């Protein structure tokens, strides 16, 4: 997008300031630096291309020029929002879901804790990071990378999960400016509902793999296989294990995958 098009797209949104780059290593890294130097609430970093984009656990997230939407939004958490920092990632997921449904008529699924899927394939990754001053969060950096058109789908060797794009599922090219504008409106609206019953209900209603068996692999704990029940008020994923017990899972160094028929223990959960 050209700068004049971006300026027009952002007109009337809550964006207070913005930086645009043709190519950048990581929008989240740039946003962190800007936040530390005084960026205002709802400041936006936008890039046509990311060459060293980061996902969770330093996974690479590369965006192709003009084919993806790569952005980081800087929020200054209010005192009421500070206890709800864990809900900023689902805030992004809810906003992406609502935007894609409104613009494209598609029905994504929000994969706990921070991806958005179409037909079981990833088209959007989310990375939320906090910037701290002492014991208080000074800023929340909400990074969103979205595969818009076909050229955005990464090569197989860079995929940690099956991938797709909005264009591939919609059947024709998508205007990135329209997606960006609607996404910003949606983030702003849902931010005002953070942690409310309507927020939690929307998240749970559109949760990927709900009612299905999944594998939770953790680098420090044993493998968990269970059926997704839902989300609790803390944002933890609730699983029913093979003993019928409810197991809450907290965000951390985990990998969530649907159970396949040939997975060890894959048929042990009722």
Image: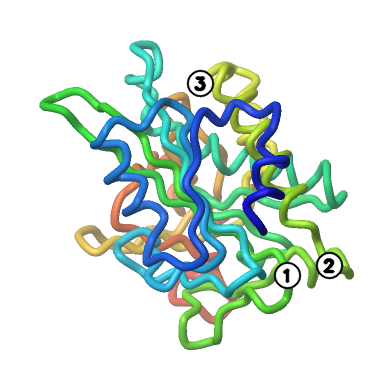
Q: Is residue 211 left or right of residue 236?
A: right
Q: Is residue 210 left or right of residue 49?
A: right
**Residue 96 placement: quadrant:** top right
What residue is drawn where x is 39% and y is 24%? Answer: 84
In this view, the residue in front, 228 or 149, is 149
Local packing at callout 3 (Cα closer than 10 Å; few below 14, some 14-19, many 20+) is: many
Give the Cα separation between the discs numbered 1 and 2: 6 Å
Whichever of labels 1 and 2 marks the residue nearer the N terminus, that label is 1
Instruction: Check the image and report above or below for 201 versus 219.
Output: above
* Residue annotated with mark 1: 149
Residue with the most extreme top position: 80
Local packing at callout 1 (Cα closer than 10 Å; few below 14, some 14-19, many 20+) is: many
Instruction: Check the image and report above or below for 131 versus 66.
Output: above
What residue is drawn where x is 59% and y is 73%? Answer: 65
Whichever of labels 3 and 1 marks the residue nearer the N terminus, that label is 1
Q: Does residue 230 show up?
A: yes
* Residue annotated with mark 3: 195
Which numbered tag is attached to residue 177? none
* Residue annotated with mark 2: 173
Instruction: Tell whether label 1 touches label 3 (CB within 8 Å).
Output: no
Q: Position of residue 170 (x, y in %)?
A: 85, 64
Q: Position of residue 250 (x, y in %)?
A: 34, 42
Instruction: Tell whether label 2 touches label 1 (CB within 8 Å).
Output: yes
Whichever of labels 2 and 3 marks the residue nearer the N terminus, that label is 2
**Residue 38 placement: quadrant:** top left
Q: Position of residue 167 (x, y in %)?
A: 79, 68
What residue is drawn where x is 81% and y is 67%? Answer: 169
Q: Is residue 86 left or right of residue 210?
A: left
């Amino acid at each position: 997008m050209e700068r004049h098009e971006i300026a027009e797209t952002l007109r009337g949104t809550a964006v207070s300031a913005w930086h645009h780059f043709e190519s950048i290593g990581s929008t989240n890294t740039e946003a962190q630096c800007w936040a530390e130097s005084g960026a205002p609430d709802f400041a936006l970093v936008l890039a046509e291309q990311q060459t060293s984009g980061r996902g969770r656990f330093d996974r690479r997230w590369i965006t192709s020029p003009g084919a993806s939407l790569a952005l980081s939004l800087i929020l200054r958490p209010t005192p009421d929002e500070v206890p709800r920092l864990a809900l900023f990632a689902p805030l992004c997921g809810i906003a992406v879901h609502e935007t894609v449904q409104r613009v494209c008529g598609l029905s994504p699924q929000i994969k706990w804790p921070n991806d958005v899927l179409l037909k079981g394939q990833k088209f959007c990754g989310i990375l939320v990071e906090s910037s701290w001053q002492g014991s208080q969060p000074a800023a929340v950096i909400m990074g969103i990378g979205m595969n818009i058109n076909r050229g955005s789908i990464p090569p197989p060797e860079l995929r940690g999960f099956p991938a797709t794009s909005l264009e591939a599922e919609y059947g024709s090219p998508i205007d990135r400016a329209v997606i960006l504008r609607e996404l910003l409106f949606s983030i702003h609206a849902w931010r005002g509902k953070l942690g409310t019953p309507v927020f939690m209900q929307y998240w749970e209603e559109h949760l990927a793999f709900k009612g299905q068996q999944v594998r939770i692999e953790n680098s420090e704990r044993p493998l968990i296989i269970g059926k997704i029940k839902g989300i609790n008020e803390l944002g933890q994923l609730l699983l029913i294990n093979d003993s019928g017990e409810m197991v809450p899972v907290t965000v951390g160094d985990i990998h969530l995958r649907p159970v396949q028929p040939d997975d060890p223990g894959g048929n042990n959960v009722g």
